[in-house]
Amino acid sequence: MAGTTERAAREERRELQTERLRDTVAHAYENVPFYRERLDEAGVSAEDVQSVDDLERLPFTTKEHFRDEYPDGLLAVDDDELLRIHASSGTTGKPKIVGYTERDLGLWHEVMARSMAAAGIGADDTVQNAYGYGLFTGGLGFHGGAEELGATVIPSGSGNTGRQVELARDLESDALACTPSYALYFAETAREMGVDPRELPLSTVLYGAEPCTEPMREELEERLGAVGIENYGLSELIGPGVAVECREAQDGMHIWEDHFYPEVIDPTTGETLPEGEEGELVLTSLSKEALPVLRYRTGDLTSLTYEECACGRTTARMNGVTGRADDLLVVRGVNLYPSQVEDVVLEFDAVAPYYRIDLYREDELDRMELTVELTGGFDGDREALCKGVLERLENTLSVRPDALELVEYGTIERTEVGKVKRVYDHR
Ligand SMILES: [Zn+2]
């Protein structure tokens, strides 16, 4: 169908989206008591969906709903139709369980293959997949997409970094799929082994699953001598494969909106925001069978643009995620995202891309301690550097850490498996 193509006219795609949204609402209503109750409460039925604009009338789904309906209350198909189950680790409480039918897995592979093609990966490339395999959707998501594309996959999984470096060198991997923090760790490990990571054949890093600021991307590109392409997705919707940057323009991530309909809302009022305004990303699945999801509040803060990209694709694009609503820190009444701190400290050439933030409460007051690593061989004036970083933080973010410690390169613990942790809130 023409409306599914990445370069279709927006109007054409809109018709397809409306049709699919109506089917999804009907499917959820029929087969998921949770949605039936909530749609009845809101007084909306599938017949009321005349266009995608009617989405605003539907209630939101939240991560708490996934938790309340644990394990399978949100699934819309019988067990015998399920081919796969994944789970996303909640930092607290029960994991969110997600299921896939055969068609869902096909869809997942298709959107992942599309993402990798947009990232410049082709059938003759070798993709080393260092995302974790298992319940986490990262590993099997990239794996399925690479196979669908006809590329060669090395399912190296997470960890075992020395071995990974050898594989990348000996099997001449063209792309490394992993979190941004792991890409840095990989580069460091290579150096320690006497391998110059820039000399490896790697030309692309397909990164995602963690927030990554522009300066952090530049660091990983510089260290690996490769182009970093940002991927976005979440298990609740499908896994990775919701959005990706195109290699041609790298100007926001293309959302595969023939399958995932995006909105941005004011996180406080729930009101839909216009194009370009930053708010919380809300996604609705348009073609999922096992787990249809209506207006899922992702917790990710971003903005959308509908302008045609320089690459010729006409999909909506989202900016890099500035933070998760969950990551918001309130320090002495000031709202702050860890990514904002990262943005500021990495502007300094003497600072390596490793830092940690510790928060304490002392005598009813917040205390913020920041630890940053120096680049190897730094022999400049530490006091002046400290002063510079503190001043820049205060001027940019209106927060001055109570203590700033500069530590030697390699001091801060590295993350080899799983997602990086940089904030330690002891309050
Ligand atoms: Zn593009």
Image (tube, grey):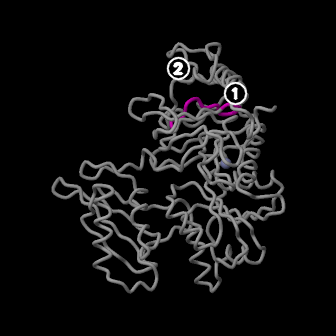
**Location of residue 283 by image quarter:** top right
Of helix, strand and loop, which one carries label 1?
Answer: helix
Q: Earlier in the sequence, mark 1 or mark 2?
A: 1
Number of residue marks = 2
Q: Is residue 322 magenta?
A: no
Q: Decide whether the magenta segment is chiefly helix, strand or loop.
A: loop
Of helix, strand and loop, which one carries label 2?
Answer: helix
Q: Is residue 289 magenta?
A: yes
Q: Looking at the rendering, in which quadrant would you find the N terminus?
A: top right
Q: Nearer the viewer, residue 148 or 317?
A: 317
Q: Residue at x 60, y 37 (%)?
A: 306
Residue 41: x and y in percent read: 50, 15
Residue 409: x and y in percent read: 44, 79
Q: Which residue is mark 2?
A: 57
Q: Which residue is mark 1?
A: 11
Residue 170 sits above or below residue 271 on the image: below
Q: Which range is magenta?
A: 286-297
- Disc 1 to disc 2, C-alpha distance: 21 Å
Residue 187 sits above or below residue 39 on the image: below
Q: Residue at x 76, y 58 (%)?
A: 121
Mark 2 crowd level (few <14, some 14–19, many ≥20, 10 Å Cα): few
Q: Amino acid at mark 1?
A: Glu
**Location of residue 279 by image quarter:** top left
Q: Nearer the viewer, residue 141 or 200?
A: 200
Q: Looking at the rendering, in which quadrant would you find the C terminus?
A: bottom left
Q: Nearer the viewer, residue 252 or 366?
A: 252
Q: Amino acid at mark 2?
A: Arg
Mark 1 crowd level (few <14, some 14–19, many ≥20, 10 Å Cα): few
63 relative position to 372: left or right: right
Number of the front mark, 1 or 2: 1
Residue 290: x and y in percent read: 69, 33
